[in-house]
Image (cartoon, rainbow, N blue to C red):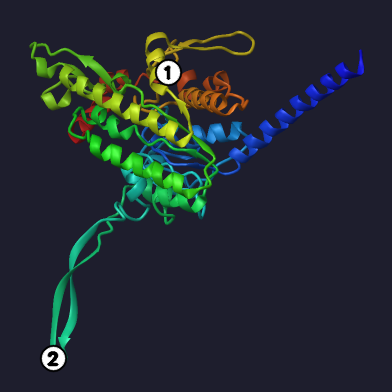
Amino acid sequence: MNIRNFWKILSGTFLIVGASTLSAQSQAQMFSRPGVIGDSLSQGFYGATVEEKTQNWAYPVLVSKQAGSNVSYNVLKGPYLNFEDVLKGDCGVFCIAASIIGGNGSTVGLPTHAGITGADYTTVLQTSGQCENINATTWAKQWYWETWYWYTYRWVQVPDCQSPDKFHQFGLRSSGTQMQVMQAVKPSFLFGTAAANHVLCTALSTSTDCLDQARFLRDIRSTMSKMAAIGSIKGGVLFTVPNVTSIAFLENYNDPQGRVNYSGLKAFFRSSVSDPSQVLDKNEVATITNFLTSINNEVKAQAVAMGFALADLKVLFDDLKENGRLIKSPSGYSPGYAKANWPLPGQPGIFGLDGVHPNMYGHSVFANELIKAINSKYGYSIPQVSEYTAWYYDSLNRNPVDLKKFLTDTLFGQFISWVIGIFV
């Protein structure tokens, strides 16, 4: 080997080592202080509640850990119930009462993870742990002495602080709105999606009345503009919203009398449809589909504008719905393909028992799609979460509960269905 070739090889070696070191430093800098805004998917909603064991499997927690970092958050213990624990007998009377009341298992002064169940880009901007809308005002009498002998009043605008829902109360406490938390945290990396509830509301209410494109566009753009102004954010990830009319919460229903506006998609817990408001007909589904397309186009545009990674979860979910996702251990064992439903005997699934949110295994799938997008955008090699391990330790997948059968075949289940039918 001549000296020129030797120096070429040596120089190439230094370049490879240097690039590797730079990449590692860049990833460490990027995830030095990850911050999170979001909704139930980010907070770890599962079964109808949020609690420590579900929060530990939320995608920002999983992705941050895989990237060698972490996020901090207020740990919840309710409100509401973990259906799986109740149906399996792991949550008795006192457990149910405590869960319904809810509270905090532990708290932090300033959470770096501010994602809250039920949130969207509007509440990211205006809902704190203490006020439903920090910008809301009302008129009140202000008494004053007009003269030394005349005490009277005038009408003035004052803050109108109404209590928010319990998820915001326990999740944000006194730290402000999600946006105010991020402005205080000054994150280096942002998990920034809160788009789903702008359209998921249609599936949960079987109505299109909640769709408001102008509000969505105004508030997502305002959110991203304020995030860019923080100045500390080096990167982030957004994701598109899956087809909400294909979630396990909804199922096809054909009216026995052939009435068109009584046929379509109904909530799984309803045995029949007694009013057109209880079903999404084909025209409403078309409206939702068009709205979803506009939402996802805006999310994609914001990802480009912010220089963020983008995970196309709509494409992922469509593929899950059509083909399923293979679960396979390192030794080659496979329990089969997971489908876009909650687990049933002999059939793995990605949903929890509410038919809306992922189970433990589903959260791992979700996290891995974000990791792929981040690695592709920034050139990192963040390792993926073991989906087989997540399936293995997911008690719902390993020991399935057929919630629909429970609701129809047991007296207690029929009572629950009747109660849900009245209040939903």
Looking at the rendered structure, the kind of residue marked 2 is: Tyr
- Assign the C terminus to one quadrant of the image: top left
Three-letter amino acid code at disc 1?
Leu
**x, y (%) of residue 146?**
15, 84
Q: Nearer the viewer, residue 256 or 3?
A: 3
Query: Which residue is disc 1 drawn over?
Result: 316
Vertical order, 196 against 390 (above or below): below
Residue 94 in view, yes or no: no
Q: Position of residue 378 (x, y in %)?
A: 57, 29
State which quadrant residue 277 falls in: top left
Position of residue 255 in the picture relative to residue 217 (left or right): left
Within 10 angstroms of label 1, few (less than 14), some, or many (20 or more) residues?
Answer: some
In the rendered image, the vertical position of residue 8 relative to residue 216, given as above or below: above
Q: Estimate the x, y position of residue 36 in percent, counting from the top left.
A: 47, 41
The residue located at (37%, 25%) in the rendering is 353
Determine whether, in the image, residue 200 is placed left or right of residue 319: left
In the foreground, 300 or 67: 300
Q: CB of mark 1 within 8 Å of CB of mark 2? A: no
Q: Quadrant of residue 356?
A: top left
Question: How much space separates mark 1 and mark 2, taking CA atoms?
Answer: 74 Å
Tell which circle, 1 or 2, labels the residue nearer the N-terminal end: 2
SS of the residue at dot 1?
Answer: helix
Residue at the extreme bottom of the image, as rendered: 148
Foreground pick, 113 / 333: 113
Q: Which residue is mark 2?
A: 149
* Residue 119 image position (x, y, % from top left): 34, 41
